[in-house]
Image: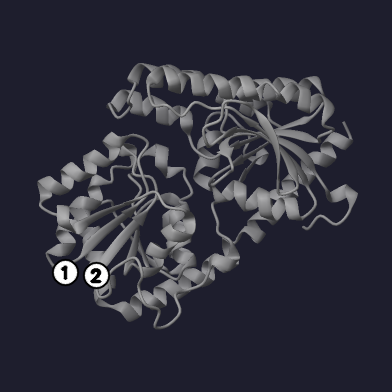
Amino acid sequence: MSATDTASVASLLIVSSDNYPPQRVDISVLFGEQLAARGHRIDWLLQSEAACDKAYTTEWHGGTVWVGPTDLRSPLLARIRKHFLGIVHDLRVFGRARDGGYDMVMVKDKFASGLFALLAARLFRRRFIYWLSYPFPESYLIRARDGTARYPLLYRIRGAFFWVTLYKILLPAADHIFVQSEQMRRDVAAEGIPLERMTAVPMGVREESAAPAPAGELRSVIPAGERCFMYLGALTRVRRLDFLVRVLVRVRRKVAAAKLYLVGRGDDPADERLLIEEARRAGVSDAMVLVGQLPQPQALRYVREADVCVSPFYPTPILNSTSPTKLVEYMAMGKAVVANDHPEQRLVIEQSGAGYCVPWDEDAFANAIVDLMEAPERARAMGERGRLYVLQHRGYRAIADLVERDLVRVARLRSRA
């Protein structure tokens, strides 16, 4: 449905954990490009990505953004101050919800500020929507228990507070809920939230990015002739990417000069040190390339030039409910993929035929990677099937249709309230 008249246009104020300017495609493309271009009025309360001592107002894709200050220093007290500044900035939701004339207030991945937004929505008779992209409460609690948290006590406190806030207050009160996958929809329903009040919105890509490398294109970031596989995404410890280092060892037993490229960064320097130490211990330090965080166009250049792209998701309930962005980004660029058995990855690969879905097993992963390295024509055919699947099912125009339908429906509910 495309907004063509007043009855089909929604106006919303979004309070989001994303920083300004937003980088995640489910914000920058879905809301910034697609929904705003259809005539929906979308304003934002966001915290600055760059160092910023004072709040300011700016325009973004036709909407107003109230940008809050931040503290980018790394010590614990500075990080606490950053969160405090964000919460104080989000108190603006009361004034904006009162004066802005919105149909609804939407919160994305916020908890304390979500309580403010819910109260503001109720006080000023706005509909309340919640967008949950990741099971944050469960993640904090698990990391506090398994020792991967930098500050275990703080993670335990945050996890418990977030859990109660999300499942006992925010989601039961929401007029509608967007979640990241059908698995997350089922998981949230298990906490007592009605299924019919939730919509699963998977990650997608711009349709324009769904293009394979031109025939004969020369490599520019990976040396010509080098055999390699690559991973694009966060290098956080919770993802257990030392697994890929051990996969690399096994790949090199059959493809001696193969290399692994890792494009991204961890939440903490210790995350990358863990990978470096694992590569040193396994004797493959010279075969693992830590590229670092790159702007998306440069990062996707590595995807384009790699022989095989991998999407490992450690089999845990926390990651089982996610919708992997990297998988559809790989497929959009016509790359054959190797992924492990994960609810959404299994579904996408089975439906598309874009690669191999294997168990979380180092030998199984390595064998699938080598198979594709040694059969480039098969890899190209898989990549093309994946690209066509993304165009049909995971382009943001189609995803925007899904989200727009529910936003307009909720807006009409308000008009009858």
In the rendered image, the quadrant that contains the C terminus is: top right
Kind of residue sitting beneath label 2: Arg
Q: Could you give the CA–CA distance between mark 1 and mark 2, rounded to whole angstroms? A: 8 Å
Please rate how many residues cluster around mark 1, counting C-alpha atoms within 10 Å: few if below 14, some from 14 to 19, many from 20. some
Kind of residue sitting beneath label 1: Val
Do the CB atoms of the residues marked 1 and 2 lie less than 8 Å apart? Answer: yes
What residue is disc 1 on? Answer: 255
**Residue located at (36% from left, 16% from top):** 153
What residue is disc 2 on? Answer: 227
Residue 394: x %, y % from top left: 57, 60
Residue 199: x %, y % from top left: 63, 44
* 287, 331: nearer the viewer: 287
* 398, 175: nearer the viewer: 398
From the viewer's perspective, is residue 406 above or below residue 301?
above
Which numbered circle lies on residue 183? Answer: none
Q: Residue 112: tell me if it is visible.
A: no
From the viewer's perspective, is residue 75 above or below residue 341?
above
* 83, 111: nearer the viewer: 83
